[in-house]
Image (cartoon, grey):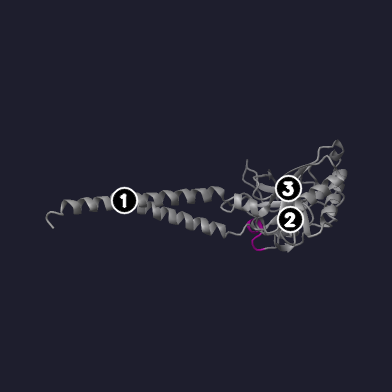
Amino acid sequence: ASELALSLVLLIGAGLLIRSFVRLQSVAPGFTADNVLSMQFVVSDPKYQDQKVLAGFYHEVETHITHLPGVVAEGAVSALPLTGSVGWEGIHVEGYNPPPGQELQVDQRDASTDYFRTMQIPLISGRFFSDQDNLESLKVAIIDQKFAQRFWPHHDAVGKHLWFDPKKPITIVGVVGVVKQYGLDTDGKIATYFPMQQGPDRGTFLVARSSSDNPGLSNAITREIHAVDPAVVIYGIRTMNDRLHDSLARQRFSSTMLGAFASFALLLAAVGLYGVMSYLVTQSTHDI
């Protein structure tokens, strides 16, 4: 009886864990992963220390990739969701004074003009980045909805300011949806995005959305990037659906193992129960 009771406890725990896993799979990641290919690349040539040259390189790569057959949109970002990439830094917000000795920490990501359209991250208010947001223009930023609701719950965040240097304010031009950056079961920090053209980095993630599943797209994109610069190092080529699937690997393993142990325990309990009953019946055969 104790063995049967313990196996039932395990089965109930496994059922609850599996139900939680099923619910977790239905959590919206904040973007659409279907038909999106991702990769990471790094440029090492000393000439890219000049930000204008680096910005020109990214623009040329974008032009090459968007003209590929089947490519709907292409974008780049410094920290792609579900890759473990982080970019935390302190920032100042208009109208907010942090407690003494503390600093507001936010997720900071550099994004290209079409990154949000490529990932289908929804625009809540304002606008996305444009080609006019370059090294010569005023500094701008896009924040996520969690950021806006925290500091301006009853007002429009567009037009408000952020800054690292009080003499160089950054204007908020848009608010986008919240992205599950570190996993479907994790609530990340409030996030802010800056135009990649205003501060490009020599290593970044590239994403391309195609109209349908295209197994040869990765080779085509690699060729186009190397056509611009053969020395570019490209790695980590994966679809966003694969990244989304792998982000649930720990939860999937836990639910599978607990379900297997619970089923095995129930089988042992059933065998034990049968053995006890068989023994009792055998002992009582003479009386019967």
Farthest residue to the front: give it: 286
Q: Which residue is mark 1?
A: 271
Q: Position of residue 270 (x, y in %)?
A: 32, 53
**For the residue marked with disc 3, what is the amino acid?**
Met
Q: Which residue is mark 3?
A: 39
First in sequence: mark 1 vs mark 3:
3
* Left or right relative to 60: residue 157: left
Question: What range is drawn magenta here?
Answer: 148-154
The alpha-carbon separation of the residues under discs 3 and 2 comes to 23 Å
**For the residue marked with disc 2, what is the amino acid?**
Ile
Q: Quadrant of residue 177?
A: bottom right
Q: Position of residue 143 (x, y in %)?
A: 70, 55
Q: Which residue is mark 2?
A: 142
Q: Is residue 47 magenta?
A: no
Residue at 67 percent across and 53 percent down: it is 240
Q: Quadrant of residue 75?
A: bottom right
Residue at 64 percent across and 59 percent down: it is 149
Farthest residue to the top: give it: 46
Tell me the quarter of the image containing the C terminus.
bottom left
Disc 1 versus disc 2: nearer the observer: 1
Are circles 1 and 2 on residues that touch, CB within 8 Å?
A: no
* Left or right relative to 45: residue 286: left
Q: Position of residue 192 (x, y in %)?
A: 70, 52
Q: Classify mark 3: helix, strand or loop.
A: strand
